[in-house]
Image: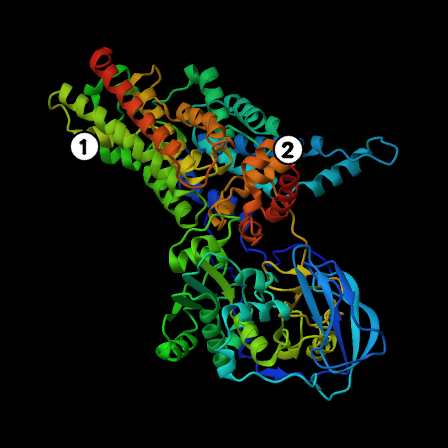
C-alpha cells in the first residue's frame, strides 16, 4: 500500500483567513446599513465605486504578477494567462479588497464626488498595498492611504456639513470637531451627546451611527478577529491623555460644560471609534508581539490627542494610525524583538505617555490655543 | 483567529477504551541494527548461531555512549533483512527464528524484591546502562546518562501526561501496571535520593488520579499532581515549571537546577530491567486513526512485526490516500511503508486520511503563532527571516529553542506550514 508523506503536525485547524475576513465584513455591516439608511443614493454611489475598483485593481495585480511562461520562455497567450492567474488567485483576493473598500467608503462623506472616490480607491489599494507586494506585505492601511489622499486633494470640495434626513434640526454649523476646531471649545454643547452617539450629526458615512460601530467592535472581539489589546490601548491612551487635557480645558472655560461632557464629546466625535474598531486592529500593519501591540496602540492614541488639540486639522485619527503604522516595523526589529514584556517595552510606553502629556499640557498652558 | 491555542480540536475519540490484546510472540522477531542515536553496530554472533532469550548479541556505537543489543527471543539468528525503521528509513534488521522455548541463559536468576531494593545507586545505574534503557516518552535518550551525574535531584517529575491528542498508551500503562510503576518509583528514589516525586496525570482522568493517590498513601515523598489538559502539557520544561515552579532555560540540563523529568514507561522499564535482567521487552502499542476500519490496543513484545497487526485492524477501503504516522498527530513523522517492527520507542501507529492539500495564504501577522508558541518564540518572524535568508536575524530569533510541537502550523490563520520554516531556520542557525 502506498502512503503519502507529509511533515508534522498532521491536524489542521478549522478556521481560516477567509473566515477572518468575512468576520470583518460582517462587523462592518451595521455601519454600512446605517450609512445606506441615512444617505441612500450617496452611499450607493460611493460603495459601488470603491469596492469594485479595489477588487479590480487587486485582480489586475494578480494577473500581472503571475505570468505563465511556456517552455521556450515566451509568455503564454492571453486566455491561458487569464486561466493561470485565476488559479493562482483565491477567495482572499476578493474578500481583502472588499474589506478595504468598505472601510474606505465609510470614511468618506456623502458629498464626495464619484471621481473623488474612484481616484482615492485606486491610490489606496495600489500605493497602500499592491506596490508593497499585496496582502500581508503592506506597511500602511490601504483604506487610510486612499482616504487621506482624497481628503488632501479634494477635501476642500467636500461639504462635511451635509446632514442626513435623520437630523431633525438643520444645524447651521459644521461637524462636531470642526465646530470646536481652532480652540473654540465653548461650542461644546451645541451637539447633544445622545445625537452624537446615535450619529445624527454631520460627518462621514461611517459616523452615522456610533452604536453600529460599537456593535461591530463587539462582534470582532468575540470572534477574535481583532486583538483586544490594540483597541484597549488606543482608546485607553486617548481617554487618559484627553482626560488630563480635559481637566485643564474645562477649568479654563469655567463651567460652560462639565469634564464628562467634554470627554463624551471627544470620544464620540470624528473617526475615533471607527478607527479604533477597524483601522488600528488590522493585523497586517501592526506589530506581532503583545507588548509591541500595546506600545503601537498607545502611540496611536497619543497622536490623536496631539493632532486634535494642537494640529491645524480638526480630525486626527487618520494621521495617527498612519504614524503608528510607521513605527510598527521598528517595534518588531529582531535585535529587540521579544514575546514577553521586557524593560525596553516599559520604558517606551512610559516615554510615549509622559512626553505626550508634557507636550499637550505645555501647549495648552502656553500655546495660545484656547479662545 | 488571533488567539492562543491550547486545545487541539479533534472529534472526541476514546481509544483508551479499546481492550488491550496481548499479542503472543511471533515466529520471526527482529532487532534494528542502527537506531536514531547510533549509526554503527558490531555483532558478536554469527548466522545460524543459537541464542538465548535476551542474550547480548552485539553493541551499537552512539558517539558518546555504547548501547548493547539483545536477542528478542530464544532461537536461531538467521541474518539481516531490510525493514522500515520508525523514522521511515529502510535499514537492516537482525532476523531471529523463535523456538518458542523462552530459554534464558543458565546463569540467569530473577531478582526478588528484597534484592532489587538492596541494590546501590551505582548498581542501578549500571543495570540501566547494561540493558541500554532509553527514554520511552519519545526522546530515546539513554537513561544511564540521565541518571548519572553529580547534581542532586531534589524534585523528580514523572511524566504521565501524554499530551499528544488521542494517544492512550501511557494511560493504559498507568492503569494496568500500577504495581510495577510504584516499585520503579521506589527504585528511582533509592537511586537518586530525591525528596519529592511528582506523578503527573491529566486532571480529566479522575479515576486514575484517585487510584494513585490511594496507592501513594503509604509512600513517603511521592504525590500525585493532576495537571490541566492542554497541549503541550507534557513538554519537559513546561511541565517542570507547572509542577515545581523551576524555570529551566532552553537547552540547559534540568539536573543543574535539581530537577529531572522521566516518562512513566521508562520507570517501569527500569524496574523490569532490575527484576528480569532484560532490556525493554514489552510495550503497549496503539493502532488508531480514522483511516482504519477498527482501532485496537495491543501489548506486544519488542521485535514483533507490526504490519500483520495493522492488517488485522484493516485499512478503510474508500480510495482515499492515507498517511501512516509513527508517534502522535502533532509531532509524529510519516513513514512510507507499513513494514514496521516494534521497537522500544514505537508506541503508537496512526493511519489518517490525508485530505485535500491546503493552500498557503500570505502571512497577515495575526500573531496566533506567537501567542501559541510554548517556548516563547516569534515563529512568523523566523519564517520571514528564513525567507529573506537574513542570517543575523535568524540567529537573533533563537530558532534552536523550538521543540517542533507543531502549534504554530496548527494555529496559523493562513494555513502556512510555519513549523517547517522554523525547522529549516534551525538547521541554518546550527551552521552559523
**Residue shown at 28%/36% (left/top)?**
A197
The x and y percentages for residue A217 are 38, 42
Q: Is residue B333 visible?
A: yes
* Tally of numbered tags: 2
Structural crowding at the residue carrying mark 1, measured as other residues with C-alpha within 10 Å and reported as few (<14), some (14–19) or many (≥20): few
Relative depth, front residue between B241 and B308: B241
Give residue B388's mark: 2
The x and y percentages for residue B365 are 52, 39
The x and y percentages for residue A24 are 47, 43
Chain identifier of the residue bearing label 2 in the image: B
Structural crowding at the residue carrying mark 2, measured as other residues with C-alpha within 10 Å and reported as few (<14), some (14–19) or many (≥20): few
**Residue B219 to residue A174: above or below:** below
The x and y percentages for residue A313 are 35, 17
Chain identifier of the residue bearing label 1 in the image: A
Q: Is residue A202 visible?
A: no
In the rendered image, the quadrant that contains the N terminus of chain A is bottom right
Q: How is the image coloured?
A: rainbow
In the picture, measured across the screen, residue B368 lies left or right of residue B92, that is left
**Which element carries disc 1, helix, strand or loop?**
helix
Mark-to-mark CA distance, 1 and 2 = 51 Å
Dividing the picture into quarters, in which one does residue A311 lie?
top left
Q: Residue furthest right?
A: A72
Dividing the picture into quarters, in which one does residue A359 lie?
top left
**Residue shown at 48%/15% (left/top)?**
A153
Relative depth, front residue between B78 and A222: B78
Which residue is denoted by mark 1 in the rendering?
A260
**Residue B276 to residue B399: above or below:** below
Q: Residue furthest left?
A: A255
In the picture, measured across the screen, residue A11 lies left or right of residue A220, that is right
In the picture, measured across the screen, residue A75 lies left or right of residue B351, that is right
**Residue A215 to residue B70: above or below:** above
Give residue B398's mark: none
Amino acid at each position: 500500500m502506498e502512503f503519502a508523506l507529509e511533515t508534522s503536525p498532521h491536524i489542521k485547524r478549522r478556521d481560516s483567513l477567509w473566515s477572518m475576513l468575512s468576520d470583518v465584513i460582517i462587523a462592518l455591516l451595521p455601519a454600512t446599513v446605517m450609512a445606506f439608511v441615512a444617505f441612500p443614493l450617496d452611499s450607493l454611489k460611493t460603495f459601488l465605486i470603491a469596492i469594485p475598483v479595489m477588487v479590480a485593481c487587486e485582480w489586475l495585480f494578480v494577473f500581472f504578477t503571475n505570468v505563465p511562461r511556456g517552455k521556450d520562455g515566451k509568455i503564454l497567450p492571453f486566455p491561458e494567462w487569464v486561466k493561470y492567474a485565476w488559479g493562482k488567485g483565491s477567495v482572499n483576493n476578493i474578500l481583502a479588497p472588499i474589506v478595504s473598500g468598505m472601510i474606505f467608503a465609510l470614511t468618506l462623506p456623502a458629498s464626495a464626488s464619484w471621481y473623488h472616490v474612484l481616484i482615492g480607491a485606486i491610490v489606496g489599494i495600489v500605493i497602500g498595498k499592491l506596490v508593497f507586494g499585496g496582502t500581508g506585505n503592506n506597511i500602511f492601511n490601504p483604506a487610510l492611504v486612499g482616504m487621506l489622499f482624497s481628503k488632501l486633494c479634494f477635501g476642500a470640495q467636500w461639504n462635511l456639513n451635509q446632514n442626513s434626513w435623520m437630523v431633525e434640526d438643520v444645524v447651521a454649523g459644521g461637524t462636531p470637531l470642526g465646530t470646536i476646531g481652532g480652540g473654540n471649545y465653548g461650542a461644546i454643547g451645541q451637539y447633544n451627546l445622545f445625537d452624537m452617539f446615535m450619529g445624527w450629526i454631520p460627518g462621514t458615512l461611517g459616523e452615522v451611527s456610533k452604536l453600529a460601530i460599537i456593535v461591530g467592535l463587539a462582534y470582532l472581539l468575540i470572534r477574535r478577529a481583532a486583538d483586544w489589546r490594540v483597541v484597549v490601548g488606543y482608546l485607553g491612551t486617548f481617554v487618559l491623555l484627553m482626560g488630563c487635557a480635559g481637566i485643564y480645558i474645562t477649568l479654563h472655560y469655567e463651567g460652560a460644560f462639565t469634564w464628562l461632557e467634554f470627554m463624551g464629546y471627544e470620544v464620540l466625535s470624528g473617526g475615533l471609534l471607527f478607527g479604533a474598531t477597524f483601522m488600528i486592529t488590522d493585523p497586517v500593519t501592526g506589530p506581532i508581539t503583545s507588548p509591541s501591540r500595546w506600545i503601537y496602540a498607545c502611540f496611536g492614541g497619543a497622536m490623536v490627542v496631539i493632532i486634535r488639540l494642537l494640529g491645524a486639522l480638526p480630525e486626527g485619527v487618520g494621521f495617527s494610525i498612519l504614524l503608528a503604522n510607521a513605527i510598527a516595523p521598528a517595534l518588531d526589529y529582531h535585535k529587540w524583538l521579544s514575546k514577553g514584556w521586557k524593560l525596553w517595552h516599559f520604558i517606551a510606553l512610559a516615554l510615549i505617555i509622559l512626553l505626550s502629556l508634557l507636550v499637550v499640557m505645555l501647549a495648552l498652558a502656553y500655546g495660545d490655543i484656547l479662545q | 483567529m488571533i488567539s492562543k491555542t491550547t486545545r487541539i480540536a479533534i472529534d472526541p475519540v476514546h481509544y483508551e477504551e479499546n481492550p488491550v490484546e496481548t499479542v503472543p510472540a511471533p515466529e520471526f522477531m527482529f532487532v534494528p541494527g542502527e537506531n536514531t542515536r547510533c549509526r554503527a553496530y558490531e555483532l558478536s554472533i554469527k548466522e545460524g548461531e543459537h541464542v538465548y532469550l535476551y542474550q547480548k548479541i552485539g553493541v551499537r556505537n552512539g558517539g558518546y555512549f555504547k548501547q548493547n543489543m539483545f536477542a528478542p527471543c530464544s532461537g536461531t539468528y538467521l541474518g539481516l533483512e531490510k525493514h522500515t525503521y520508525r523514522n521511515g528509513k529502510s535499514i537492516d534488521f537482525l532476523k531471529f527464528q523463535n523456538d518458542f522455548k523462552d530459554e534464558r541463559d543458565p546463569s540467569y536468576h530473577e531478582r526478588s524484591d528484597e534484592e532489587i531494593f538492596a541494590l546501590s545507586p551505582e548498581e542501578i545505574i549500571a543495570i540501566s546502562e547494561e540493558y541500554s534503557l532509553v527514554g520511552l516518552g519519545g526522546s530515546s535518550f539513554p537513561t544511564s546518562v540521565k541518571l548519572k551525574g553529580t547534581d542532586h535531584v531534589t524534585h523528580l517529575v514523572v511524566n504521565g501526561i501524554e499530551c499528544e491528542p488521542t494517544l492512550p498508551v501511557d494511560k493504559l500503562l498507568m492503569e494496568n501496571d500500577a504495581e510495577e510503576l510504584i516499585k520503579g518509583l521506589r527504585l528511582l528514589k533509592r537511586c537518586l535520593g530525591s525528596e519529592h516525586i511528582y506523578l503527573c496525570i491529566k486532571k480529566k482522568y479522575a479515576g486514575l488520579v484517585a487510584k494513585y493517590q490511594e496507592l501513594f498513601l503509604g509512600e513517603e515523598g511521592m504525590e500525585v499532581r493532576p495537571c490541566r489538559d492542554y497541549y503541550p502539557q507534557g513538554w519537559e520544561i513546561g511541565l517542570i515549571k507547572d509542577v515545581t515552579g523551576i524555570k529551566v532555560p532552553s537547552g540547559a540540563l534540568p539536573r543543574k537546577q535539581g530537577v529531572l523529568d522521566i516518562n512513566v514507561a521508562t520507570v517501569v522499564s527500569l524496574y523490569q530491567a532490575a527484576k528480569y535482567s532484560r532490556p525493554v521487552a514489552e510495550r503497549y502499542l496503539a493502532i488508531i486513526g480514522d483511516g482504519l476500519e477498527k482501532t485496537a490496543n495491543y501489548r506486544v513484545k519488542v521485535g514483533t512485526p507490526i504490519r500483520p497487526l495493522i492488517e488485522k485492524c484493516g485499512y478503510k477501503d474508500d480510495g482515499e490516500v492515507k498517511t501512516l504516522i509513527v508517534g502522535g498527530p502533532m509531532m509524529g513523522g510519516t513513514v512510507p511503508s507499513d513494514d514496521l517492527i516494534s521497537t522500544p520507542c514505537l508506541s503508537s501507529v496512526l493511519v489518517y486520511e490525508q485530505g485535500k492539500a491546503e493552500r498557503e495564504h500570505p502571512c497577515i501577522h495575526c500573531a496566533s503563532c506567537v501567542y501559541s508558541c510554548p517556548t516563547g518564540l516569534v515563529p512568523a518572524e523566523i519564517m520571514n527571516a528564513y525567507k529573506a535568508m537574513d542570517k543575523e536575524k535568524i540567529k537573533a530569533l533563537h530558532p534552536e529553542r523550538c521543540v517542533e510541537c507543531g502549534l504554530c502550523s496548527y494555529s496559523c490563520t493562513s494555513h502556512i506550514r510555519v513549523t517547517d520554516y522554523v525547522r529549516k531556520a534551525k538547521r541554518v542557525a546550527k551552521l552559523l
